[in-house]
Amino acid sequence: QNKKIGSLNVTMALRLVTSRVAASASSRSLAVAVRSTNAAAKAAAATSLPSFSVSRFQNLQQPASCLSTDASANLDAVPPPAEKIVLPPMVYIAGEEMTHYASNLLLDQWIKPYFDISAWEYFDLSCKARDESDDKVLHDAVAAGARVGAIFKEPTITPNAIQVKEMGLSKAFGSPNGAMRRGWNGITISRDTIHIEGVELGYKNPVLFERHAVGGEYGAGWNEVGAGTLLTTYIPKDGTPPFVVDKRDLTDDHNVAVVYHNPYDNVIDLAHHFFKRCLDGNVTPYIVTKKTVFKWQEGFWATMKEIFDKEYKTQFEKAGLLERSGGDLQHLISDAATMQLIRWTDGGFGMAAHNYDGDMLTDQIAQVHRSPGFITSNLVGKADDGRIIKEFEASHGTVTDLWLEHLAGKETSLNPLGIVEAMMGAMNHSAGLALETNPNDEVTKDMHAKVLNYTSTLRLALHNTFRYGQGTRDMTGPEGYTTEDFVGKVAWRLGRYLAKQEEETPPPVLEEPDRHYRRNYDVDHTSLRKLFEKYEDGSGNLDYKKFSKMLTKMGVAPEKSKKEDEKVDEVKNV
């Protein structure tokens, strides 16, 4: 018997001690540890789809009935936990049309069963809500985002003249993005390729992109003018004399005069954010400008290069990430970057550019990779007190064509991948901010760990649903799942994956496993017992088990006699 016990190593001993019966459905809670992909895949072997109902989060438009109603499907459904995890504050900005409808499905079936989201602050940025509030809702949302620091945003509509008339709006409201970038001191818009392990997409490895969040054409002032002289004058804030930045004579009778600037103070923050992300993502960095023609862009490159040489070059060299770029940070003319995005389909690189160039180049990345639904879009800003503000959204629009089909009662098949990545990113950032505020609070630490585990498990469930051929029609063809059925299938798989992680009771805090579990355990208990009896004074303060453990741990317990050729190496056999 002792030989059998001695053959168990410490790892097996821990498994035996911590083994517990799986949790009952009424007492489930999210586990902190993520199970392996293989174990999760085995748990997802069945393919039946549970029926479900759709509840409202806020002004949810009811769906057409496109769901499986097979009663037998409920046999495989996993009941949600009885106790939900309370999430910290987060700003939720709702949009409209198909992406709003899909987002509500995700909330009802993927988020609400596991989390209490009552601390989330909700703002309706539909055109109707903006019109009814005279855009006060936008200002309130921006203020809340600056205060909370973690924002999820659904795609919204910036109405054109035709839509203003169709919707009966009082005016054409501008894009909310500009107000958000200004209100949150926008530094950069991070746009990265989304990858599904086991599914081949456009780029084999990640591509990261940082788009300067402010300046350029998007904030330009302009007017139509005739023949004459255009004078651009700078008036310094410090009271020093003004001077002319540009003077030009206009000879045409019809001209458009455009004036814009690029604020460069936050390029330092952009540089640090970009280089850190490239190191974390194990990709090679490139800086993109058109400085050979647009001389005023030289400052962007110069700042990025200075930060790189001073603080990051050595780290990139040690990581071997400069081999493909000639051993240094490389500058790419925007025209060349356009060509390289098509050629470098192995991925493994990152780019940083001005606002407009970044907008254009990330659209190209989306097309090479597959579509705008397969890249992220995260605005990174900075509060006045130095806190990082992050807003997460899908990089695509409201998907009007599918919305019109949905309203007509037809089946739709929207891939929610970009929306889900944004929602998970916002949840992770919100939990991270809470942990930064209360790093020693056990409840906060537990919540943070469970949120990270949940989002990792949701991502696994989502990706595996595609891999099992149960994806939306953009991925699996005309036989693919409808919008509602896909959300239901992922919800089913998520529930099963999470259930496999649960324990009936929290695992106990263990003492060091007995040393006799080791293969080379050779303590002579007969001699040790005699030694114990010699020193035990009859008070009961020392028992044999503690005495044996102490001497064994110290390495002074008497050992059984061995022949020389039977001795084993202590290090090799633990």
Image (cartoon, rainbow, N blue to C red):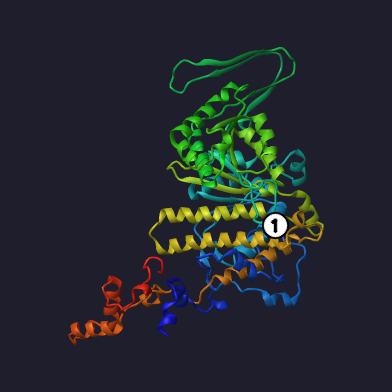
Q: Residue at x 67, y 47 (%)?
A: 156
| SS under mark 1 | helix
Comparing 331 with 154, the one in front is 331
Give the quadrant of the C terminus.
Answer: bottom left
From the viewer's side, name the closer residue of 573 and 9. 573
- Going by the numbered disc 1, the residue's amino acid type is Tyr
According to the picture, the residue beneath numbered tag 1 turns out to be 101
Residue located farthest toward the left when viewing the structure as drawn: 537
**Residue 512 appearing in the image:** no
Judging depth in this view, the residue of 558 and 132 nearest the camera is: 558
Residue 485 at x, y percent in the picture: 73, 64
Q: Is residue 272 left or right of residue 102?
A: left
Dividing the picture into quarters, in which one does residue 252 lie? Answer: top right
- Quadrant (top left, top right, bottom left, bottom right) of the N terminus: bottom left
Q: Is residue 27 above or below residue 340?
A: below
Relative placement, left or right, of 23 versus 539 is right
* Image position, residue 64 (x, y; %): 77, 63
279 vs 1: above or below = above
Foreground pick, 50 / 513: 513
Going 80% across and 55% down the picture, which residue do you hit?
Answer: 405
Callout 1: 10 Å neighbours few (<14), some, many (20+)?
Answer: many
